[in-house]
Image (cartoon, rainbow, N blue to C red):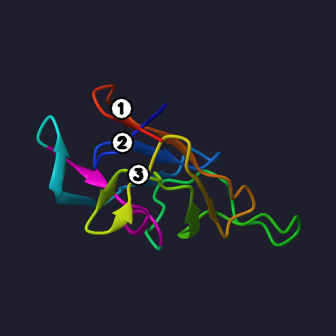
């Protein structure tokens, strides 16, 4: 089973960029709000170390452009919550996002 993401979970790009997910206070884990996919999609990416380089077409990750793979059964306000098995990407040269729940109390499918 996959672990549910909370607002303190780690969402990163390969260039060590960080996304701060927004949680929904209706459901919490240890007092920290659970995150839906819309709490990640469109968010800014900070601290990406990939350099912008027009010679190599390298582009820094700046924002999340897509997120998928919500929980099928566990929902908050009608939408499935984000999981550590969710998928996501940025418009950067290394677009794939990595998710780490940072909690082990709540799992979902």
Mark 2 or 3: in front is: 3
Residue position marked by numbered label 3 in the rendering: 73
Stretch in magenta: 32-41
Whether residue 8 sits left or right of residue 95 in the image: it is left
Report x, y in % for residue 53. Answer: 78, 66
Residue position marked by numbered label 1 in the rendering: 102
Whichever of callouts 1 and 2 sits on the residue coming sooner in the sequence is 2
Secondary structure at numbered mark 2: loop
Nearest the camera: 69 or 98? 69
Q: Which residue is drawn at 36% across and 32% down?
A: 102
Residue position marked by numbered label 2 in the rendering: 9
Q: Rounded to the nearest whole Å, what is the CA distance between mark 3 and mark 1? A: 21 Å
Classify 29 as above or below 43. Answer: above
Classify 33 as above or below 66. Answer: above
Whether residue 46 sits left or right of residue 67 in the image: it is left
Q: Rounded to the nearest whole Å, what is the CA distance between mark 1 and mark 2? A: 5 Å
Residue at far top of view:
104
Nearest the camera: 36 or 42? 36
Q: Residue at x 75, y 61 (%)?
A: 93
Report x, y in % for residue 101. Answer: 40, 36
**Label 3 environment density (alpha carbons within 10 Å; few <14, some 14–19, many ≥20):** few
Secondary structure at numbered mark 3: loop
**Label 2 environment density (alpha carbons within 10 Å; few <14, some 14–19, many ≥20):** many
Quadrant of res 5: top left
Residue at far right of view:
55
> Is residue 35 part of the magenta span, yes or no?
yes
Residues under numbered marks 1 and 2 in contact, where contact means CB atoms less than 8 Å apart: yes
Q: Which residue is drawn at 72% across and 55% down?
A: 94
Whichever of callouts 2 and 3 sits on the residue coming sooner in the sequence is 2
Quadrant of res 88: bottom right
């Amino acid at each position: 089973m996959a672990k549910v993401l909370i607002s303190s979970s780690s969402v990163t790009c390969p260039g060590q960029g960080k996304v701060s997910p927004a949680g929904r206070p209706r459901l919490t884990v240890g007092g920290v709000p659970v995150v839906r996919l819309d709490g990640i999609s469109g968010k800014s990416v900070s601290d990406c170390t990939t350099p912008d380089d027009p010679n190599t077409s390298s582009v820094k990750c700046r924002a999340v452009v897509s997120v998928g793979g919500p929980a099928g059964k566990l929902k908050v306000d009608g939408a499935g919550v984000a999981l550590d098995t969710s998928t996501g990407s940025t418009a950067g040269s290394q677009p794939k996002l990595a998710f780490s729940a940072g909690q082990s109390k709540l799992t979902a499918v």
